[in-house]
Amino acid sequence: MKDEVLMQKSHRIGYDHALRNCGVKIVLAETRKELEKAINDKTAMMWFFNGNNFVGEVRDEEFVEIAQKHGIPSFNDCAADVPPVENLWKHTDMGFDLVCFSGGKGLRGPQSAGLLIGKKKYIDAARLHAPPRGNTVGRGMKVNKEEILGMLATVEAYLSNDHEKEWKLWENQIQLIHDAAASVPGVKAEIHVPDVANHVPSLRISFDPDKTKMTPDELRQKLREGHPSIETVGGEDSVGITTWMMQPGQERIVARRIREILEAG
């Protein structure tokens, strides 16, 4: 039985235990030449992490081309890559045999469900590991009937959204928070949109150490301990904020709290 999964070194992430749980051996490569050299009669699949599309040496279209050239099934993990909505069909149109999306995140559906999209023969194979079969590797990740129907409702609702209107809302929300933070001396606020994964208007807040004693960790902790508790992302150098999971109006609460904390210094 084929038991090797080939991926780029730069696409190695903590979640690849889902592959290893199936008993496969992960084979790593960096360049196109190395990928093609690593393909053999034990290669079961070539796996791609879309969030690192701009990190690896081999981009998505070339990766698919290599897989098709050698007759190897290809899988693209697009967990956090909606929006934009067209990603739901972009990667299968590109040639990937299987593509998966989280049910939560941008789709805002059941967190423990998701979408597996692609060729019927591979979807049918995946279904062999789902209920009512209880002696499979998928048993520990069982998705119940209510979540499956919730996922169907999620996709129908998401496809009917006014995506341009939704994007404009996010831009306005993040601009409000940006203006509140940037109004405080010594605070730098930068709006950006990640190229892939969580592709939404986002805010990065950092500090001029010569003008303020506040640090990103201190701001993050005060936001977390306040009422309501506000969670942020980012690292040691900045505090990151997105609004796409907020209800309209909640951005005003966030903007007010950030300004209050920063002004109190």
Image (cartoon, grey):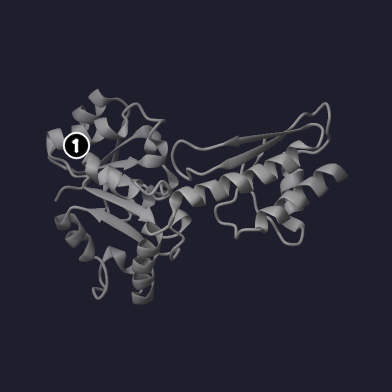
**Camera-side residue of 40 and 63:** 63
Q: Quadrant of residue 65?
A: top left
Instruction: Say which element carries label 1.
Output: helix
In this picture, residue 260 sits left or right of residue 62: right
Residue that carries the numbered disc 1 in the rendered image: 67
Q: Nearer the viewer, residue 131 or 151?
A: 151
Is any atom of residue 140 visible in this view?
no
Q: Is residue 42 visible in the rendered structure shown here?
A: yes
Give the image location of residue 4, x and y in percent: 23, 44
> Looking at the figure, which quarter contains the C terminus?
top right
Q: Residue 7: x percent and y percent?
A: 30, 38
In the image: residue 169, left or right of residue 260: left
Q: Residue at x 46, y 48 (%)?
A: 164
**Based on the displayed image, in which of its 4 quarters is residue 219 positioned?**
top right
Q: Is residue 139 above or below residue 188?
A: below
In the rendered view, tell whether residue 186 sits above or below residue 225. above
Q: Residue at x 15, y 37 (%)?
A: 68
- The residue at the point 60 percent across, 60 percent down is 247
- Relative placement, left or right, of 249 versus 212 is left
Residue at 80% x, 31% y: name it: 186
* Residue 63: % across, % down: 26, 33
How many numbered tags mark residues here?
Answer: 1
Mark 1, Cα crowd under 10 Å, few <14 / some 14-19 / many 20+, is many
